[in-house]
Amino acid sequence: MRIARAEVNGVTTYGIVQPDSHLYDLPRMMLTVREMRGQVGDTPRSMLDTAMGGSRLNEAFLDAKRELEAHGLLTRFALPETARLLAPVTRPNRILAIGRNYAEHAKEQGESVFAEPIVFLKASTSVIGSGAAIEIPDWIGQVDFESELLVVLGKGGKNVREEEAMGLVAGYTVFNDVTARTQQKADQERKHPWFRSKSLDTFGPMGPYLVTADEVPDPHALRITCRVNGVLKQDDTTGSMVYRIPALIAFLSRWFALEAGDVIATGTPSGIGPIVPGDTVECSVEGVGILTNPVVAAS
């Protein structure tokens, strides 16, 4: 399933994206059909619950869609084209980001791959959806794009074994780990954390959809790219990750308990570079989606 979160007239909802790109209000649909049938329970409580339901909930949705269509009610639940897409996880529990997880990217930064994953946090308040603007303050110096595959956890766990790790994954989306590079380098020279250079407002574009895990048989065999103003800047595959997703989940859960709603930014390939107001950035992961954001000057 491809699940989108959207806002209509100030109200936030979510739905399953159909092949014709129509988006239907899933919670209202499911609730209405259950009321029509005199049933209770089983309505998804959240977007993550829906994602973890996988094919079972997709079948329930299609069943509800058929019944509403038969009663001439389906159009009531179709979201208008003017609906604004939001980030699939608007306020992640934690953004757990992995540094230098592609060897060529480490090399272009003049760094080496560490013997264990490099982990840093990025503020959840940095998150914006596809179509929203990346806002760059005029005092910040160079700002770079970083196209990444984002792993969304639907379950938590502590001391998770690698062979069980993928069972925690609700799905995937595209992420742009926008970085204030000048500030990051200054902080590195002082041996300070990277947090502030990664966490400015709007520096966490995510989307456009959450693609459930069952739709991505091998998340380590996906082409990942970034284009700026239509020009290809990054082009690699997720197979180039140094530390793969099960290893990352196992490693992180050894240090602290993971929770549903945590997201893991799995690192960026080589080819990173600057963006400036007036640019348009397109980050893409094969089979997951294209995340598009204009770049503007912060007001």
Image (tube, grey):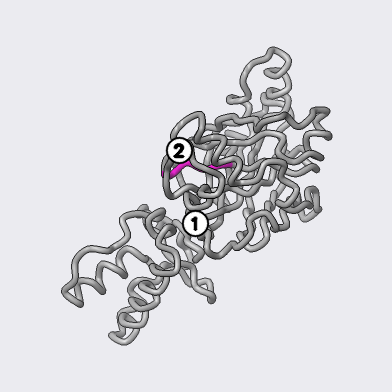
In the image, 126 versus 95, the foreground residue is: 95
Is 184 in the magenta? no
Instruction: Give the residue type at disc 2.
Output: Leu
Q: Image height check: is 75 above or below 227?
A: below
Instruction: Give the residue type at disc 1.
Output: Leu
User: What residue is shown at x 47% (from left), y 63% (from top)?
Assistant: 82
Label 2: few (<14), some (14–19) or many (≥20) C-alpha neighbours in 10 Å: many
Q: Which residue is mark 1?
A: 85
The secondary element bearing badge 2 is classed as loop
Label 1: few (<14), some (14–19) or many (≥20) C-alpha neighbours in 10 Å: many
Camera-nearest label, 1 or 2: 2
Q: Image height check: is 108 above or below 38?
A: above
Residue 193 lies in quadrant: top right
Give the magenta part as a residue range: 260-264
- Residue 258 circle label: 2
Secondary structure of the magenta portion, mostly? strand
